[in-house]
Amino acid sequence: RARARFPAQRPRALLLAAAQVGRGGLDAVRGFYEREFTGDRGFSGTFEVYSPDVTAELGARTVVVHPPFRWQRDYAREFVSGLAHMSEDSDIVFAVENMFPWRAGSRELVAYAPEVNVVDGDYPFVTLDLSHTATAQTDAMQMYEKLGDRLAHVHLDDGSGSGWDEHLVPGRGGQPCAQLLERLIADKYRGTVVLEINTRRALTPQAREADLAEALAFARLHLLNGSPAAL
């Protein structure tokens, strides 16, 4: 299935870059989500090909998908049925990621549709991100219990519960990172765990490498050694 779009615009402010591409591990790829142009005059064109076969050719088993933004009405309207249709035609796992409301002081905006809390959605498979549970101020372990076998992918990171999506090194925030990992082992979890941390605050390449090494050591400690979680 293919789709082409060629929008144009001519506002007064400067054009802001808004494209983002990412991968979610050795056997997973991150799905895309659209961004609107916000700025200077310009033309853009997109040609999108929808095919789970691309993921299979990469040797991946999982596609991580963000829920649509609320203003993406057509996409949101077909989101659940579209995932179901693609799942029927492919062995690829489409795992919808838990998101969070946007906050500014006491104000809150639910920017995603059909819902932020994917536990309540009609999704066969889900991605659990611990930075997002921190930002949403939801109970990660309670979500884990409710998801059961629907949990197919885990983003291992941390958060302090602020209004920002922090993606801290596991153990530096308030999320039950160690507890979750050890439950995954105890419950014989067969999905994927991927580190997804933000290293932008690292002032030097050495500091960035140290953050990555600390995160990897944390994951190995609690996934491979099965040591007791810190209380």
Image: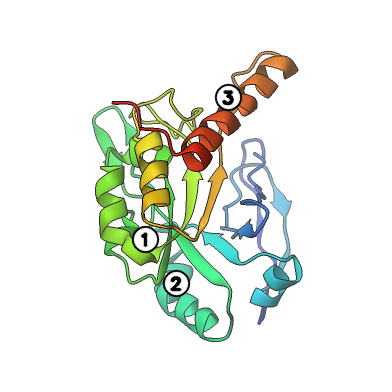
Q: Disc 2 and disc 3: Cα gap in Å?
A: 37 Å
Is residue 149 visible from the viewing direction of this image? yes
- Mark 2, Cα crowd under 10 Å, few <14 / some 14-19 / many 20+, is some
Earlier along the polypeptide chain: callout 2 or callout 1? 2
- Numbered label attached to residue 101: none
User: For residue 108, which quarter of the picture?
Assistant: top left
Eye-nearest disc, 1 or 3:
3
Task: Give coordinates of residue 154: x percent, y percent.
Answer: 47, 50
Query: Which residue corresponds to mark 1?
Result: 113
Is residue 68 visible from the viewing direction of this image? no
Task: Give coordinates of residue 22: x percent, y percent.
Answer: 65, 49
Q: Which residue is drawn at 35% across and 33% down?
A: 175
Q: Disc 1 and disc 3: Cα gap in Å?
A: 35 Å
- Numbered label attached to residue 79: 2
User: For residue 231, which quarter of the picture?
Assistant: top left
Kind of residue sitting beneath label 3: Glu
Query: Which residue corresponds to mark 3?
Result: 214
Q: Disc 2 and disc 1: Cα gap in Å?
A: 9 Å
Kind of residue sitting beneath label 1: Ala
Left or right: 146, with 230 as reference point:
left
Instruction: Determine whether label 2 and label 1 are within 8 Å by CB.
Output: yes
Label 3: which secondary element: helix
Location of residue 218 with respect to 88 vertically, above or below: above
Left or right: 43, with 221 as reference point:
right
Q: Depth check: give the residue in front, 147 or 133.
A: 147
**What colour scheme does the image use?**
rainbow
Task: Give coordinates of residue 142: x percent, y percent.
Answer: 24, 49
Location of residue 142 with respect to 49 vertically, above or below: above
Quadrant assignment for the N terminus: bottom right
Q: Depth check: give the residue in front, 17 or 172.
A: 172
How many numbered dots are placed on residues in this image? 3
